[in-house]
Amino acid sequence: MKHFQKEIETILGKKLKKLQFERLKDIYNYPKEKNPFYKGLYRKVEIKKINFLSVFENFPFTKKLLEIITYL
């Protein structure tokens, strides 16, 4: 089987979870930096410093954020 990004597509375990967690933080950080609405919504949160997935359970998740996730 050919891989487009072999290093990323074949990682397992803790490395995969870490990569997914970093990407999740990027998904939330992108609109915070680019959109005034999300900048205000997340103004007190330093997303890059979040270390636990459970923190995201309390974040507002809107249709617009779903659209951003889809097109990243």
Image (cartoon, rainbow, N blue to C red):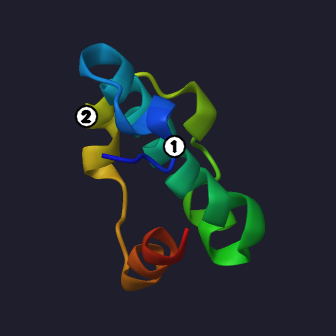
Identified by mark 1, the residue type is: Gln
Which residue position holds label 2? Answer: 54
In terms of depth relative to the viewer, which is nearer, 44 or 72?
A: 72
Secondary element at image label 2: helix
User: Is residue 28 rendered to the left or right of residue 1?
Assistant: right
Of mark 1 and mark 2, the one earlier in the sequence is: 1
Q: CA distance from mark 1 to mark 2?
A: 29 Å
Looking at the image, is 57 positioned above or below residue 21?
A: below
Tell me residue 62's x, y (percent). Answer: 37, 77
**Which quadrant would residue 13 be assigned to in this image?**
top left
Tell me residue 48's x, y (percent). Answer: 61, 33
Image quarter in which the C terminus is found: bottom right
Secondary element at image label 1: loop
Residue occupying the far front of the picture: 1
Mark yes or no: residue 52 visible: no
Taking the spot 37% from the left edge, 84% from the top edge, the residue there is 63
Mark yes or no: residue 30 visible: yes
Which residue position holds label 1? Answer: 5
In terms of depth relative to the viewer, which is nearer, 63 or 60?
A: 63
User: Is residue 7 rendered to the left or right of residue 17?
Assistant: right
